[in-house]
């Protein structure tokens, strides 16, 4: 796939899956997309292992943009990126944006073939408003 | 640096105190956060104990790195990456400068601060970790260091949370001990108990 991939990380699998449904509705299969939610025991929370697997599923050589909801999702996503091999880690970014709106905006931008930097900038415009 | 038997005792003591205080930690977290700190820490402790023999067979720096990785992968929540980073960074520092424990500990706590984008005084586990570093640097005895840790944890009660989910509560976070500060103090007490 030649478009930037999107990963959605929420404390809640329902939120992550719902946000992914909204992204699919917008861009169909034009963008590699994966989501994860819930802690390693299935409760509300996030899991580094699940984030790593989601990055793998949404992998694109043009990069992957991660959208997160609350603090732990961001910290665990940063941890996951550091655990990737360095060549891959340099192509994964976390967007400072609201998870649902950010994912839809980022994916829409990605579907047009935008670079990883442009995808992130588009998502982060939401926080700048 | 530390015998296999001593390391086993330390890991088991830390794990026991986490299991023993899991409900208390969760209750503290329920007051100002999302109420999962005890449950998450207990899961991490179980994951570490499940690999106890493999861990204690390693030299201390490698053992710490394995513990850190297990915590990162199993705890979930923000405490997994924070305590995981503490162990991973301390392991890394100790392989580089094995004779400077205090310096290694300070740099490891700095790594936790960077991971959490926080610093001392924001009602987090750093409010306990930095006083412990100071006590270790000042060559205080283990019982003194434990007292410092508990006093530092208690002081978070009157502080307003500036990082993490608790910060959403603003002034309403005042009056509750920070769960991460409390778990840090409990861990220090357990480590000291196993080393004495």
Image (tube, rainbow, N blue to C red):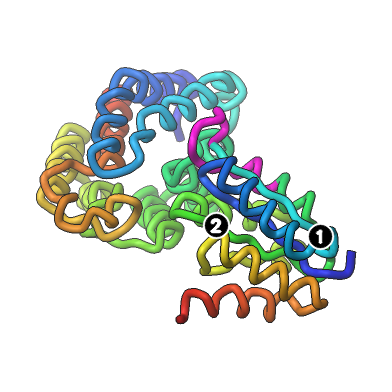
Relative to A109, A2 lies left or right: right
Q: Does the magenta stretch include residue B170?
A: no
Start-end of magenta stretch: A39-52
Q: Nearer the viewer, residue B139 or A35?
A: A35
Using the image, name the chain to which the residue with label 2 belongs.
A
Tell me residue A77's x, y (percent): 58, 54
Q: Please say whether residue B67 is visible from this viewpoint.
A: no
Disc marking residue A59: none
Q: Is residue B19 above or below residue B144?
A: above
Q: Which of A26 and A123 is in front in this view?
A: A26
Q: Is residue B184 above or below residue A35?
A: above
Magenta-highlighted stretch: main secondary structure? loop
Tell me residue B118's x, y (percent): 34, 61
Q: Residue at x 16, y 37 (%)?
A: B150
Circle count: 2
Q: Which of A79 and B100 is in front in this view?
A: A79
Q: Quickly name the residue at label 2.
A: A68
Using the image, name the chain to which the residue with label 1 belongs.
A
Q: Which residue is drawn at 79% across and 49% down?
A: A57
């Amino acid at each position: 796939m030649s478009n930037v991939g999107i990963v959605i990380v929420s404390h809640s699998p329902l939120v992550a899956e719902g946000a992914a449904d909204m992204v699919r509705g917008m861009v169909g299969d034009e963008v590699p997309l994966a989501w994860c939610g819930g802690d390693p025991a299935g409760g509300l929370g996030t899991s580094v292992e699940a984030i790593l697997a989601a990055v793998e599923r949404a992998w694109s050589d043009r990069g992957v943009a991660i959208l997160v909801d609350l603090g732990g999702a961001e910290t665990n996503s940063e941890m996951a990126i550091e655990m990737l091999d360095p060549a891959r880690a340099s192509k994964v970014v976390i967007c400072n944006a609201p998870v649902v709106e950010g994912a839809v905006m980022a994916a829409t931008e990605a579907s047009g073939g935008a670079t990883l930097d442009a995808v992130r900038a588009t998502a982060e415009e939401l926080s700048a408003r | 640096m530390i015998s296999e038997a001593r390391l086993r005792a330390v890991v088991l003591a830390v794990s026991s105190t986490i299991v023993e205080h899991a409900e208390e930690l969760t209750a503290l977290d329920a007051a100002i956060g999302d109420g999962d700190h005890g449950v998450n820490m207990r899961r991490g402790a179980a994951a570490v104990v499940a690999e106890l023999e493999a861990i204690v067979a390693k030299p201390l720096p490698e053992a710490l790195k394995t513990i850190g990785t297990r915590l990162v992968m199993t705890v979930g929540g923000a405490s997994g990456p924070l305590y995981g980073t503490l162990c991973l960074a301390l392991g890394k520092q100790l392989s580089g400068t094995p004779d400077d424990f205090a310096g290694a500990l300070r740099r490891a706590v700095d790594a936790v601060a960077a991971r959490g984008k926080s610093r001392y005084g924001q009602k987090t586990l750093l409010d306990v970790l930095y006083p412990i570093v100071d006590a270790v640097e000042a060559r205080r005895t283990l019982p003194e260091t434990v007292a410092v840790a508990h006093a530092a944890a208690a002081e978070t009660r009157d502080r307003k949370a500036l990082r993490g989910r608790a910060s959403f509560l603003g002034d309403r976070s005042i009056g509750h001990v920070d769960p991460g500060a409390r778990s840090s103090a409990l861990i220090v007490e357990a480590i000291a108990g196993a080393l004495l």
